[in-house]
Image: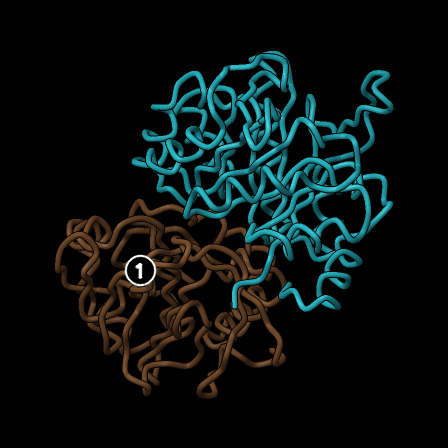
Chain colours: A brown, B cyan
Amino acid sequence: MIAIIDYGAGNIFSVKNALDHLGADSRLTADPEMLRCADGLILPGVGAFPWAARKLDASGLTGVIKEQAQKKPLLGICLGMQLLFEKSFEFEECEGLGLVKGYVDRIPEDDLIIPHMGWNKLEYTQSCPLFEGLGDDEYVYFVHSYKAFCPDEALFAYSEYGSRVPAVVGDGKHVFGCQFHPEKSGRTGLRILENFVRMCGEVR
Amino acid sequence: MLAKRIIPCLDVRDGKVVKGVNFQGIKEVGDPVECAAEYDRQGADEIVFYDITASHEGRGVILDVVRETAKKVFVPLTVGGGIKTVDDIRDTLRAGADKVSVNSQAVQNPQLIKDGADIFGSQCICVGVDAKAVGENKWTVFINGGRIDMKIDLIDWVKQCEQLGAGEICLNSIDTDGVRGGFDLPMLKAVVDAVNIPVIASGGAGKLGDFAEAFLTTDCSAALAASLFHFRELTVGQVKEDCRSKGIIVR
């Protein structure tokens, strides 16, 4: 079972719909016990970083996520990916989960249309189990105004928007993050989710 | 690079896709969930449901359509038409829509844009704007499907929308809508130059080259069409192929 962490941040139903479509067993939950017994975790999220970080804290989930991320696959999506980093500067300096090296700040180019919204191409920098079965010309759907700044070893793919926008990041072990929405990225996104589900040993 | 988006729009009434045929009334032409799935197969970058259900009681039906579509179609979904309050926005997003498009209601109550953006985020608030030329490079905003001239300057209005927190503008030209002679490029360019949020071109696509022309002449982010795709005169795939052959980046 994959636990989709439900801490009140949007787009969880879309993630659930996509996993249902793939035939994967998943639950929307905020119960720490469920997170402990799940085979994998998905941290979704839409909204502002400080609000989400506080919400995770208040739900008593921050510690459980950090502990479980050492043992099983964790996929952060959009704001959920940003929460994996050490800190963010959205509105105020705020601590993240610290599972991936780097921080989150505003997309710096002033002349660009913000949010970065729409389909952008994945440029791979390292191999990653999430990319299995993907070709060279894959587009995914982004909606965000803040982006990650991370060292090369944490970056697996980026998209070009003024500069490099980290698209897929990770700790090189169990923790992965997608800045884009795989659940809204058509066949490419479903393939990425399917790869994650497989990593969790879950496709029935 | 960000790809230019091609967006098919489905007009939905009481849960069925409808189309006005030669201005002689409206007929039902299909199931919206199936139509959306077909557009997804063709490579649509986003799908818009425009709800023209007249009665307030009928509102729930479009939410069922969205709910069912969201189980099968994994690209962004937008719902427009009949969204009057923050609660309407909430219900629509909860049903599985990624964005709502507000039009007449936003002109009459601009606070709806601000409230929607503050609560749900700018990314899910698209403002639909119907406009018509009233002079050389001068346009005004209309509401109620182009019937009422609000005498508001188009450029002032789109700037206000951006300030209020709109995440996107869907610009429909009443002058070119239904004429099928191409998008209203002067109007489109004026709006794109006035704001720093994505602008979707709408109204006027009649042939293959019209989409590429909009992307090559203006910096619009997306182009939308309804009947052209609906009556299968063109597929989304053909439009993208044409754009690609002209050096435009599409998915």
Q: What residue is shown at x 31% (from left), y 35% (from top)? A: B119
Q: What residue is shown at x 46% (from left), y 72% (from top)? A: A159
Expressed as whole percent of the image width and height from the top left, the position of residue A96 reads 19, 64
Q: Nearer the viewer, residue A89 or B144?
A: B144
- Establish if B122 lies above or below A70: above
Q: Nearer the viewer, residue A68 or A97?
A: A97
From the viewer's perspective, is A197 left or right of B210?
Answer: left
The amino acid beneath tag 1 is Tyr
Expressed as whole percent of the image width and height from the top left, the position of residue B1 reads 52, 68
Quadrant (top left, top right, bottom left, bottom right) of the C terminus of chain B: bottom right
From the viewer's perspective, is A26 left or right of B55?
Answer: left
Expressed as whole percent of the image width and height from the top left, the position of residue B93 reads 46, 37
Q: Is residue B117 among the parts visible in the rendering?
A: yes
Expressed as whole percent of the image width and height from the top left, the position of residue B8 reads 69, 44
Q: Give residue A21's quadrant in the image.
A: bottom right
Q: Nearer the viewer, residue A86 or B156?
A: B156
Q: Nearer the viewer, residue A12 or A152?
A: A152
The residue indicated by pointer 1 is A146
- Establish if B27 lies above or below B123: above
